């Protein structure tokens, strides 16, 4: 953890204690932050607190979103949910499951894409809503009235355009690595994801917190 010689306005030792307490209140007494996960948690804390000193030291661009990768059960969804409590309203992500979005598309069709892109603004403003799309890659290509659509691919491409034009921030959690993401969503989206996201990756040694 690279915080000792950096002038940060935050006490990260205290933040870790608060995070674990919040986690226990939310997920039960068995919640903990494993030592091997601390580098990722430092980055998440710095990002959502908009701590420029730590962000600079960690190579984080505060104007981009987060692509949080790691194997199944390492705690991606739990941590992103807990980080919502730290974020100001304009930075607080709305968590939504990619699987849920694919179900929505099968029911109501292409309006789902605009719901999470061109219509994803605070009412009566041009301020975009931050979304965190959870478990990218588990959703299926969906058929609507005979048309197949990679719904999340279309949503992310639309949000990329809005990232460029309106600074719309997007976060994603996924079990897939970069190569697997490209295989599912194609090179066109993969290249845009590099522009949209800071890549935060859990260690391969991170354990399954569900057991």
Image: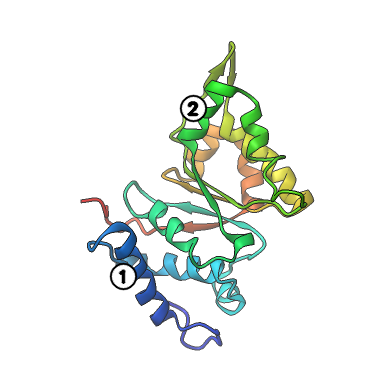
CA distance separating discs 2 and 1 = 37 Å
Camera sees residue 210: yes
| Image quadrant occupied by the N terminus | bottom left
Is 26 located above or below residue 4 in the figure?
Answer: above
Residue 156 position (above or below residue 168): above
The one of 198 and 93 positioned closer to us in this rendering: 93
The residue closer to the viewer here, 165 or 100, is 100
Residue at point 59% right, 23% down? 108
Judge whether 31 appears above or below 69 on screen: below
Residue 118, image x, y percentages: 72, 40
- Furthest-left residue in this view: 211
Residue 188 appears in view: no
Residue 153 point in image, percent of width and height: 60, 34
At mark 2, the secondary structure is helix
Of residues 204 and 4, the one nearer the viewer is 4
Task: Please name which of the two marks, 2 or 1, marks the residue nearer to the observer.
Answer: 2
The residue indicated by pointer 1 is 35
Residue at (50, 88) in percent of width and height: 5
Q: Looking at the image, which residue is at 61% across and 31% down?
A: 112
């Amino acid at each position: 953890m690279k915080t000792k010689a950096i002038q940060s306005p935050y006490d990260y030792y205290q933040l870790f204690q608060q995070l674990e307490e919040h986690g226990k209140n939310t997920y039960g007494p068995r919640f903990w932050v494993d030592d091997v996960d601390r580098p990722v948690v430092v980055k998440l804390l710095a990002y959502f607190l908009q701590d420029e000193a730590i962000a600079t030291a960690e190579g984080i661009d505060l104007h981009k979103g987060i692509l949080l990768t790691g194997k199944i059960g390492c705690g991606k969804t739990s941590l992103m949910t807990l980080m919502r409590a730290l974020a100001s309203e304009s930075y607080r992500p709305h968590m939504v499951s990619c699987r849920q979005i694919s179900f929505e598309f099968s029911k109501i069709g292409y309006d789902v894409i605009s719901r999470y892109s061109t219509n994803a603004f605070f009412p009566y403003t041009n301020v975009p809503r931050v979304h965190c799309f959870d478990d990218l890659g588990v959703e299926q290509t969906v058929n609507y009235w005979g048309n197949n659509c990679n719904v999340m691919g279309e949503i992310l491409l639309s949000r990329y355009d809005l990232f460029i034009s309106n600074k719309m921030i997007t976060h994603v959690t996924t079990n897939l690595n970069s190569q697997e993401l490209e295989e599912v969503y194609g090179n066109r989206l993969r290249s845009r994801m590099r522009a949209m996201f800071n890549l935060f990756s859990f260690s391969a040694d991170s354990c399954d917190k569900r057991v």
